[in-house]
């Protein structure tokens, strides 16, 4: 059997040169640890040591949770997900080599040149460059192989027939809905976010006075030209149609309460105090297939590529003996264990 080294990211040695790199090593040491008995798994004739798995787990935790700990009860499942990814990585690298895929030497050289530029001032880099690159280069080659295999499987899906694209459309109609659109007029009393509370209070008071005038029948466009600090002021505050989901949450909530031509109460937002008028509302509309055929075909290809990738992994796992020492995982809660077994 042969042992594989799965030092993710840039390898632990190179990572120590980066800002926060020492913290990464500390994370590896302080992450919730399962028993460290070797090997963690065997995949065909490849052995994955417990140390390799723990390194992969530490890097994955840092990437997903940064300094935070996993939520209560989530760590057990997260361990198993990382374990599956480590096993899949071995299988996929073997498949890439079986297909005769070669690493992208030009891209790897460019990456190493980037390291030289980034770490060139480090004495550690100057004295240990070749030793570090000897550890990092195989990782870069592996990443390149995986990237090329991924693109080979996912990106070579031929365009669907109209019949297939239409079937995808019918099954996923919610993906092809034109969202609700609103047309608004705006009066914005601009306030710098860092202004003291007294400035914000003055803007709120002025907004209340303007709002009272609007309720009394004053012309919205005239007041917008006089008082608004928004770019729409020269147009009387009138804005173009926009999807409701594009509005800041506070404005969207105010708009939801308005009927056509109604004026909102003053609304505090990041840029200041806003007063809105709802000029028009276009309901969400289902777009017909002929109008979205190209998009339906694109989404089908993307989904088909993902399905082919998942099938490749499933086929590789069926064809290759995989043994994982699950005693190295923190036990699942009894209910989750029962669900997993069932």
Image: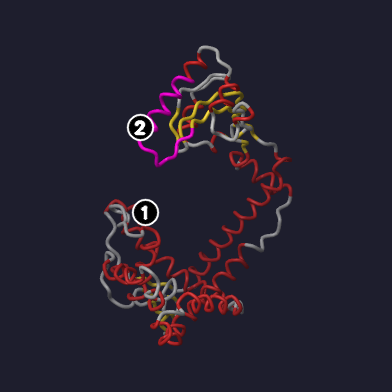
Which range is magenta? 190-210
On-image quarter of the C terminus: bottom left
Camera-side residue: 31 or 120? 120
**Residue 190 x, y percent position in the rendering:** 48, 34
* 250 shown above or below 98: above
Residue drawn at 47 percent across, 29 percent down: 253
In the shown orientation, is residue 225 left or right of residue 197? Answer: right
Sort mark 2 into few (<14), some (14-19) or many (20+) by Cα contacts within 10 Å: few
Please check the rendered image and state whether residue 204 is part of the magenta-colored stretch, yes or no.
Answer: yes
Q: Badge 1 is on which residue?
A: 342
Q: To which residue does mark 2 refer?
A: 198
Magenta stretch: dominant secondary structure: helix
Q: Can you tell which quarter of the image residue 76 is in?
A: bottom left
Report helix, strand or loop for mark 2. helix
Horizontal arrangement in the rendering, residue 130 relative to residue 329 (left or right) = right
In the rendered image, residue 123, in percent from the top left (x then y), is placed at 39, 83
Query: Which residue of the protein is positioned furthest toward the top in this rendering?
Result: 216
Number of callouts: 2
């Amino acid at each position: 059997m042969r042992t594989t080294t799965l030092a993710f990211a840039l390898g632990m040695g190179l990572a120590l040169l980066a800002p926060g790199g020492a913290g990464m090593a500390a994370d590896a040491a302080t992450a919730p640890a399962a028993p460290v008995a070797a090997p963690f798994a065997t995949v065909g004739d490849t052995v994955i040591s417990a140390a390799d798995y723990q390194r992969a787990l530490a890097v994955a935790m840092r990437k997903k949770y940064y300094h935070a700990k996993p939520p209560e009860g989530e760590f057990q499942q997260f361990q198993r997900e990382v374990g599956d990814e480590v096993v899949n990585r071995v299988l996929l690298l073997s498949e890439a080599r079986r297909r005769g895929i070669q690493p992208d030497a030009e891209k790897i050289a460019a990456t190493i040149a980037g390291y030289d530029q980034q770490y060139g001032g480090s004495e550690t880099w100057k004295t240990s460059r070749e030793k570090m690159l000897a550890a990092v280069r195989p990782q870069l080659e592996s990443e390149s192989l995986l990237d090329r295999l991924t693109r080979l499987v996912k990106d070579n899906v031929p365009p669907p027939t109209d019949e297939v694209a239409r079937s995808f459309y019918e099954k996923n109609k919610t993906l092809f809905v034109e969202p609700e659109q609103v047309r608004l007029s705006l009066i914005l009393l601009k306030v710098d976010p860092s202004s003291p509370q007294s400035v914000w209070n003055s803007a709120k008071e002025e907004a209340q006075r303007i709002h009272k005038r609007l309720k009394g029948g004053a012309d919205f466009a005239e007041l917008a030209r006089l008082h608004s600090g928004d770019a729409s002021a020269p147009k009387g505050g009138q804005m173009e149609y926009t999807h409701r989901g594009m509005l800041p949450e506070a404005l969207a909530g105010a708009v939801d309460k308005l009927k056509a031509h109604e004026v909102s109460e003053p609304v505090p937002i990041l840029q200041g105090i806003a007063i809105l008028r709802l000029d028009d509302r276009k309901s969400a509309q289902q777009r017909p297939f002929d109008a979205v055929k190209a998009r339906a075909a694109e989404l089908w290809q993307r989904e088909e590529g993902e399905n082919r990738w998942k099938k490749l992994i499933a086929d590789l796992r069926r064809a290759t003996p995989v043994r994982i020492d699950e005693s190295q995982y923190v036990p699942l809660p009894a209910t989750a264990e029962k669900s997993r077994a069932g």
